[in-house]
């Protein structure tokens, strides 16, 4: 088959759910997710066919079902962009893995697949889903530890032979490494694409970084309204756009604290726009207590006296 014929199909798969005028960051995430789920489903279906040829119909049904779900569900809905749905999908996968490890024992060769699910967690959830990261890591660790500690073997005989996925240890290792490489590749690709977008955004606003001789950009109501909209959407372009509308804000903060972090600057920018603690928590998917802690640390970091209102202090910049 001519490889060039596969390119239109691959583009069709990659651009599913991508619409004209979408945010660039969202487009990158959508394309990577589409590619990732398609490749994972392809691997599961191929493995299912292999198990069927070896006379393991139970394995075939399980693997083929998982492969079909991976390709069908995201095809019609952006299921992986709903953090709760993604968490349930990953939990379901670990439960299936836990069951088959328990049926045939810990040393049946498929326990290492827990690590591939861990890599999937790192790829699927972004930086705004820290609680999901923690929960999924604990969930996987508990299931893995229970199977390893008790070495459960719930069945024996013919049924046990049917659900023992890999009798050949070399095949097991190769398939595990394949899944691990796919997950690792997409994690690396995601980080590279994020860095590329970040560099492009910095290059676009590079003239506004200078402290001297930079013409002031008018703070028109439409510009401020656009900033508020970006902040409410927790858009990655918010801080870059903010520095365009308020070109001297960052330099003023930098003079007072040269080691200011991106998180500190973003919090200062949100305070500059008048966002309340509750607003910041809602739009950034954080707990109110977490935002309060960030504001307390900001006070200590910049040496803001306790008696001075933080919004009044930020207004001077």
Image (cartoon, rainbow, N blue to C red):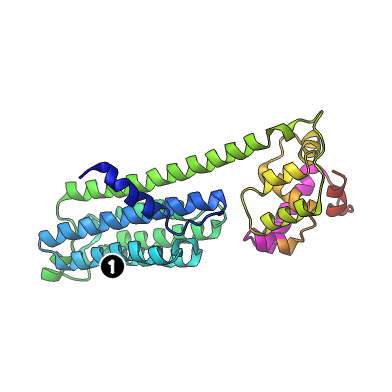
Q: Which residues are magenta?
A: 280-303
Residue 177 as seen in the image, left or right of residue 244? left
Label the magenta part by its dominant secondary structure: helix
**Magenta span includes 301:** yes
Residue at screen point 24% across, 67% down: 62
Residue 1 drawn at (x, y percent): 20, 45
Residue 29 drawn at (x, y percent): 48, 52
Residue 302 as seen in the image, left or right of residue 139? right
Viewer-closest of 234 and 267: 234
Residue at screen point 68% across, 33% down: 206
- Name above or below for residue 66 compared with residue 23: below
Residue at screen point 38% across, 43% down: 185
Q: Secondary structure at mark 1?
A: helix
Observer able to see residue 307: yes
Residue 16 as seen in the image, left or right of residue 59? right
What residue is pinned by disc 1?
Answer: 99
Viewer-closest of 211 and 291: 211
Viewer-closest of 50 and 17: 17
Residue at screen point 14% across, 62% down: 52
Viewer-closest of 90 and 68: 68
């Amino acid at each position: 088959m001519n490889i060039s014929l596969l390119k239109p199909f691959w583009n069709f798969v990659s651009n599913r759910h991508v619409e004209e005028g979408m945010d660039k960051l969202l487009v990158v995430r959508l394309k990577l997710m589409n590619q990732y789920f398609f490749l994972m489903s392809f691997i599961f279906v191929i493995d299912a066919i292999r198990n069927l040829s070896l006379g393991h119909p139970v394995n075939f049904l399980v693997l083929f079902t998982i492969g079909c779900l991976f390709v069908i569900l995201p095809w019609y809905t952006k299921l992986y962009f709903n953090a709760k749905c993604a968490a349930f999908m990953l939990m379901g996968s670990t439960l299936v893995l836990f069951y088959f490890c328990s049926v045939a024992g810990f040393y049946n060769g498929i326990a290492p697949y827990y690590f591939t699910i861990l890599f999937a967690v790192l790829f699927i959830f972004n930086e705004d889903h820290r609680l999901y990261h923690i929960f999924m890591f604990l969930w996987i660790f508990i299931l893995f530890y229970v199977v390893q500690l008790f070495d459960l073997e719930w069945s024996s005989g013919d049924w046990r032979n049917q659900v023992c996925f890999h009798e050949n240890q070399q095949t097991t290792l190769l398939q595990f490494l394949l899944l691990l490489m796919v997950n690792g590749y997409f994690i690396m690709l995601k980080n590279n694409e994020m860095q590329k977008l970040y560099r492009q955004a910095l290059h676009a606003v590079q003239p506004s970084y200078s402290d001297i001789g930079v013409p002031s950009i008018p703070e028109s109501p439409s510009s401020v309204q656009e900033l508020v909209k970006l902040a409410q959407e927790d858009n990655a372009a918010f801080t870059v756009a903010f520095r365009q509308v308020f070109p001297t804000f960052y330099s003023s903060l930098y003079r007072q604290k040269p080691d200011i972090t991106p998180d500190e600057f973003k919090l200062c920018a949100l305070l500059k726009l008048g966002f309340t603690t509750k607003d910041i928590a809602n739009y950034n998917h954080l707990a109110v207590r977490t935002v309060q802690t960030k504001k307390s640390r900001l006070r200590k970091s910049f040496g803001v006296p306790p008696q001075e209102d933080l919004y009044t202090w930020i207004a001077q910049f």
